Image (cartoon, rainbow, N blue to C red):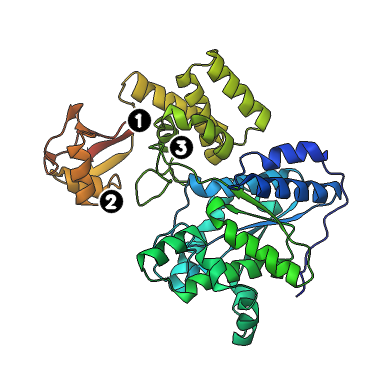
Amino acid sequence: MTAPDRVPSPARRMAPVEDQLRVLMSGTEFGDPDTARTMTRELRERLVEDRPLRVYAGYDPTSVDLHLGHTLTMRKLRQFQDFGHDVTFLIGNFTGLVGDPSDKNKARPMLSAEQLAHNARTYTQQAFRILDAERTTVRYNADWLGELTFADVIRLSAKFTVAQFLRRENFAKRFEAGDAIYVSEFMYALMQAYDALHMETDVQIGGSDQLFNLMAGRTLQEDAGQRAQVVLTTPILVGTDGHARMSKSTGNYIGIDEPANDVYGKVMSIPDSAMLGYFTLVTPLPPDEVDAVRKALGGGTLAAMDGKKLLALEVTASLHGAAAATEAQAYFEATIQRRETPDEMPEHVLAAPAPLNAVLVDAGLAASNGEVRRLVTQGAVAVNGEPVSQFTMEVQAGDEIRVGRHRFLRLVAEDTGKQA
């Protein structure tokens, strides 16, 4: 197996090893101290070589939008970039055909190649909110996985046993319950391991639920006579509720492509208990600055509200830039803290009075009539400052609608004037 062609990096002196190590190991989670010690030692050994390391993380395009939970590994990639290492953003357009079973208690629905291609088109654009596009190599694993023969797959699968797979927690639970476990799900780890082997990587980054897959890459590399990659895993980010894993399906997510006002407002909604974890995992602040925030919060010199505002500002700035983040903070303070109605808000044109649910869906403030019903039931919708009790109530031009704490909509009449 040969490594892909690479443009040689210019000779440069890397940052001091311990400085790099402190940043790169910050926010990692391995599940047991022995693995953490091993990976720390092996990463130090490679950093001592004073050369750009080959680092990558893979992303299966199983949905259109990325959220903050996806950025944990991207921020780790960015840290490596900022220290001068070679970073690859790998799009799993072949592994995505199966889908990673690591975080699931059942098999994922299999997507078509067409669906994956459609989803992948937005991935790099979103990822480059975190990564430096000019210093990122984008690759697709179908380029090599699609070339393997059935004989190749047999040889690779012979490196692992069924017992190894069944020791994985999610597979063990499903096996105990008598639920189906498909051979294709076993193949996912094998395919991800082959990615590392093919690219001869020094470091692979993934979520802590992917540890088995990443370690499988070490197995294949060692078997092929390569030096086993260093594995760095990040914890699972809790959502805005502070408890469950961030997920679009549960609604507790913050999307990378959401408007700055929404990002800022959603970060402000997380519980105080999740604040320090967010500082560590989803902001570009170095460990010493996060430690300073932790001490200030613990010592009472930084109020929780002010700490949350700092967090929201950092997260929003990292996705939308400093100017947009500052504007989002001013918007939040006016609309949420002082309960002012903003002078400027999105407008929606109405030709005639219409039901509220239809307007909110048409304007993109709700995905469906069912969501409008839920929002109204929760008291999250107001028209002209008054809470709504009927989700089908009639609204008209001139009305101002508030959805949640920080989304507004002004209804305007259709311009029926004729141009001369």
Q: How far apart are marks 2 and 3 (CA)?
A: 20 Å
- Residue 263 makes an appearance in the image: yes
Residue 225's disc number: none
Mark before the other along the chain sequence, 1 or 2:
1
Given residues 399 and 133, the one toward you in this image is: 133
The residue depicted at 68 percent of the width and 28 percent of the height is 288
Q: In this view, does 86 lie above or below 129?
A: below
Proximity of marks 3 and 1: CB atoms separated by less than 8 Å = no
Q: x and y percent of residue 302 in the render?
A: 53, 16
Circle 2 SS class: loop
**Crowd class of label 2 (few under 14; some 14 to 19; many from 20; radius 10 Å):** few
Residue to which mark 3 is pinned? 260
The residue depicted at 48 percent of the width and 76 percent of the height is 183
Q: x and y percent of residue 299 in the render?
A: 56, 14
Q: In the drawing, does residue 243 fall left or right of residue 210? A: left
Residue to which mark 2 is pinned? 367
Report how many numbered discs are placed on residues in the image: 3
Q: In this view, does 181 lie above or below 335?
A: below
Mark before the other along the chain sequence, 3 or 1:
3
Proximity of marks 2 and 3: CB atoms separated by less than 8 Å = no
Residue 344's disc number: 1
Mark before the other along the chain sequence, 2 or 3:
3
